[in-house]
């Protein structure tokens, strides 16, 4: 992932108003984040209860940021994250909604997805998968999971960014 700055994060947000961009609170320890182990940067805003942000590099090298809002209701059963699709999730999965960019978003159109509550997807896909058979290539499977995470996350933010 590319290294992000405060200004690059704020300018990448495609579905946030100027007020929402100025109210953004960077994640704790932002200066010490190791971007080499992240496929995207996601965090919950510590000052705004249900608000979260995801900054995702797209397949064409662009960076798109989206403002997300956690739904008030939680899934009734154990949900699977739509981005990392880890079946052994050590964390909670919640529904996040995002208003669309442009006129559609101003009219109230939204999209949503199930994501790890605290955006642990990058760590989840780097965990060794269970070995289903002798000779299974765990490192290739781990790389495939990382590639799939990038594809699913970038597809979601590109959908939000479309006007």
Image: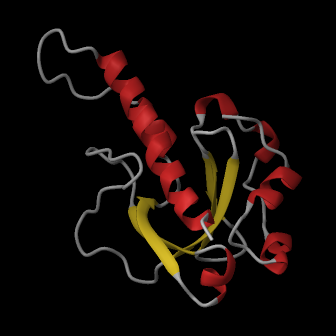
Kindly give the residue lying farthest to the front in the view shown: 163
Residue in the picture at 30% in, 18% down: 138
Residue in the picture at 11% in, 18% down: 133
Q: Quadrant of residue 79?
A: bottom left
In the rendered image, residue 106, in percent from the top left (x then y), is placed at 66, 87
Is residue 2 depicted above or below 159 in this figure? above
Residue in the picture at 66% in, 34% down: 1
In the rendered image, residue 26, in percent from the top left (x then y), is placed at 77, 58
In the rendered image, residue 55, in percent from the top left (x then y), is placed at 66, 52
Residue in the picture at 30% in, 56% down: 80
Q: Nearest the camera: 91 or 140?
A: 140
Kindly give the residue lying farthest to the left in the view shown: 133
Total residue callouts: 0
Left or right: 27, with 23 as reference point: left
Left or right: 58, with 62 as reference point: left
Is residue 67 depicted above or below 64 in this figure? below
Is residue 38 depicted above or below 83 in this figure? above
Q: Quadrant of residue 7?
A: bottom right
Q: Nearest the camera: 78 or 1?
A: 1
Give the image's coloring scheme.
secondary structure
Left or right: 90, with 67 as reference point: left
- Give the quarter of the figure containing the C terminus: bottom right
Kindly give the residue lying farthest to the bottom in the view shown: 107
In the rendered image, residue 84, in percent from the top left (x then y), is placed at 39, 45
């Amino acid at each position: 992932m590319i290294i992000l700055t405060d200004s690059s994060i704020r300018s990448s947000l495609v579905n946030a108003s100027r007020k929402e961009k100025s109210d953004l609170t960077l994640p704790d320890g932002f200066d010490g984040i190791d971007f080499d182990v992240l496929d995207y940067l996601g965090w919950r805003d510590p000052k705004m209860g249900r608000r979260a942000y995801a900054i995702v590099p797209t397949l064409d090298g662009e960076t798109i940021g989206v403002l997300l809002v956690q739904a008030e209701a939680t899934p009734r059963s154990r949900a699977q994250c739509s981005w990392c699709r880890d079946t052994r999730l050590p964390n909670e999965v919640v529904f996040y909604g995002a208003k669309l960019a442009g006129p559609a978003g101003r009219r109230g159109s939204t999209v949503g997805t199930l994501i790890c509550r605290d955006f642990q997807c990058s760590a989840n896909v780097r965990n060794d998968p269970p070995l289903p058979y002798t000779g299974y290539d765990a490192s290739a499977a781990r790389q495939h999971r990382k590639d799939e995470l990038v594809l699913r996350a970038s597809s979601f933010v590109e959908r939000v960014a479309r006007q």
